[in-house]
Amino acid sequence: MRFQQADGILDLRTAEEYQAGHLQDSTWLTWQALPECLNELPATPAKLFLVGDKQEIEAASLFLDAKGYEINGSLVIESSQAMISWAKQLPGLVVSGKESKNLWSPSPLVNEFVQQLDYDPKAMKPRPKTLDLGCGGGRDSVFLASHGWQVTAIDQEARVLKRAKQLATKSGASIKFKCCDLKKSDCFPEGTFDLVTVVRYLNRDLFSQIDAAISPGGYIVYQTFSCGAEAFGSPKNPNFILQEGELSEVFAAYRIIIDRIDTLEDGRPMASFIAQKPAE
């Protein structure tokens, strides 16, 4: 069935309708909320199956198509009786309750770092601290917080931070968010951190501050577009593109764990870098 082949099943109906009955492994997200909840969807390109009335499905389809998603099918539900009927036709595949599947995921490099750690942040007192620069929609920040890190997340876009805060609230994650421009001197936080993460953001002027902010024995996880990405149309500005081996030169004193080029599904190369600062 098409909904079983999708990367996500979005149920666009009201909370009451959803809880009364929905397809197994569905995610409840009203179509009106979609513009402010893109960070709760899987990364594009992805296939989504939609459930709702005709108007909801049409509105959501237009919006999601413009954002790069593929709609691989839909189930039109015009009344509560319709879902009851589908439950009879799809035994075991229609369930009730509030459970809603989580579709978002952190950046693969941040996830890889967490999986390779030889300690559990949740078991440490005090818990280790993380600084997420250019946090965007907050996926990495929420993921790290859920794994026991004390997270400070910074981004200059208030609207984007609003989405990040919503995701944190839904996930039960406690994060210190800061809305400011990292190009300004009063934005970068004081103190040191056990981990600094930077994903899809490049400001070379911050390299020295990042180094100073990492505690002895702490880590840097950095991933952003690499030389060659300009051939795909975006980004083209060299200020936003890392040169080959650039991070290993900047952080030459560190123990380099990962220094490689990964490739997005659209073909763009990404520099992936993980390194540990020497302990004093």
Image (tube, helix red, strand yellow):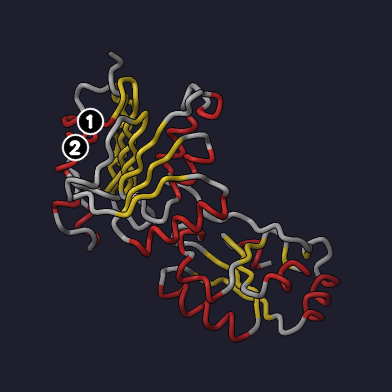
* Numbered disc 1: secondary structure: helix
Q: Quadrant of the C terminus?
A: top left
Check if mark 1's residue and mark 2's residue have beta carbons within 8 Å: yes
View extreme (top): residue: 280
Q: Residue 160 in the image: x percent, y percent?
A: 38, 61
Give the side of residue 89 with respect to residue 2, left or right.
right
Q: Quadrant of the N terminus?
A: bottom right
Instruction: Say which residue label 2 marks.
Output: 207
Q: Residue 113 in the image: x percent, y percent?
A: 43, 33
Q: Quadrant of residue 30?
A: bottom right
Query: Residue 227 or 140: which is nearer the viewer?
Result: 140
Q: Is residue 95 above or below residue 152?
A: below
Q: Is residue 78 above or below residue 211?
A: below
Q: Which residue is painted at 43% across and 43% down in the image?
A: 108
Q: Residue 26 in the image: x percent, y percent?
A: 66, 62
* Numbered disc 2: secondary structure: helix
Instruction: Say which residue label 1 marks.
Output: 211
Q: Which residue is painted at 50% across and 44% down in the image?
A: 174
Three-letter amino acid code at the position of disc 2 = Phe
